[in-house]
Image (cartoon, grey):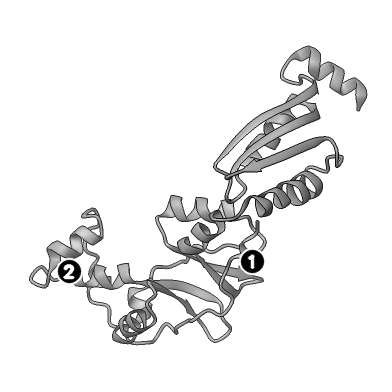
Amino acid sequence: MKVNEIMTADVLTIGPEAPLKDVARILVEREISGIPVCDIERHVLGVVSEADILFKERGRPSEGSALVGWVLGGSVMPDAAKAAARTVNEAMTAPAITIGPFRSVHEAARLMTEHGINRLPVVRDGELVGIVTRSDLVRAFVRDDDEIHDEIVHELLGRTLWLDQDAVEAEVRDGSVLLTGEVRTRSDAALLERLVTRVPGVVAVDSKVHWRLDDSTRKGRQSLERTL
């Protein structure tokens, strides 16, 4: 599954010179947690979020800093520039972590987890075309077995690995996948299992796929080289 299949294409953006008060009002009214900051050509300059606004408030010990510190995890020291920010440009987080529309949902989840962020602007040729959030990834995970099966068979086995239609069979039940069949090498079998594990909605993989050549051994690699 690709990012463009789950992203929101109609994205609310804001300019870098907008007052920070306006951002806070928009976040509350729209019930969202962050907004991409773009120039007039929709190039992403950064992201401004609830965390950026809370960061500013945290610089004021007399104004609920205990609560704000808890929300931010109590690990980020106040930044003088953000604490004094009045505009989006002064408060936003930049550069923004972005992703392309044809990258995998697995990659989007990895970026969000590694960088501790809740959203990724989706960019194509430098221009904002959508946004994907953690909520989108959770919804992608809640897919029925038929959808999961179709992606494994048509996208992964057919278009990614170029396997014969009858080489491998996939049975999906409540998100658990049973793989049976035969592939050329042990490495192919291992790669297949890793890729199926990354399919959104898959909770477990039981691979009973056999291989004709064990390319993890010297003898197997030599046999493989003779067939190439």
Q: Residue at x 31, y 81 (%)?
A: 24
Horizontal and vertical percent position of residue 166 = 85, 38
Q: In the image as oriented, which residue stretches furthest toward the top?
A: 219
Horizontal and vertical percent position of residue 182 = 80, 28
Q: In the image as oriented, which residue stretches furthest toward the left?
A: 62
- The answer to whether residue 81 of the structure is visible from this angle is no
Label 1–label 2 contact, CB within 8 A = no
> Which residue carries the number 1 mark?
4
Mark 1 or mark 2: which is in front? 1
Q: Amino acid at mark 2?
A: Gly
- Quarter of the figure that contains the N terminus: bottom right
Along the polypeptide, which appears first: circle 1 or circle 2?
Answer: 1
Up/down of 206 relative to 9, above or below: above
Does residue 17 appear to the left or right of 228 in the view shown?
left
Q: Residues within 10 Å of mark 2 (few under 14, many from 20)?
A: some
Does residue 9 appear to the left or right of 34 in the view shown?
right
Q: Which mark is residue 59?
A: 2
Among the 4 quarters of the image, the one containing residue 172 = top right
How far is the residue under mark 1 from the one under mark 2?
38 Å
Instruction: Report helix, strand or loop for mark 1.
Output: helix
Q: Amino acid at mark 1?
A: Asn
Q: Residue at x 65, y 59 (%)?
A: 2
Among the 4 quarters of the image, the one containing residue 219 = top right
Among the 4 quarters of the image, the one containing residue 73 = bottom left
Instruction: Report helix, strand or loop for mark 2.
Output: loop
Horizontal and vertical percent position of residue 163 = 83, 40
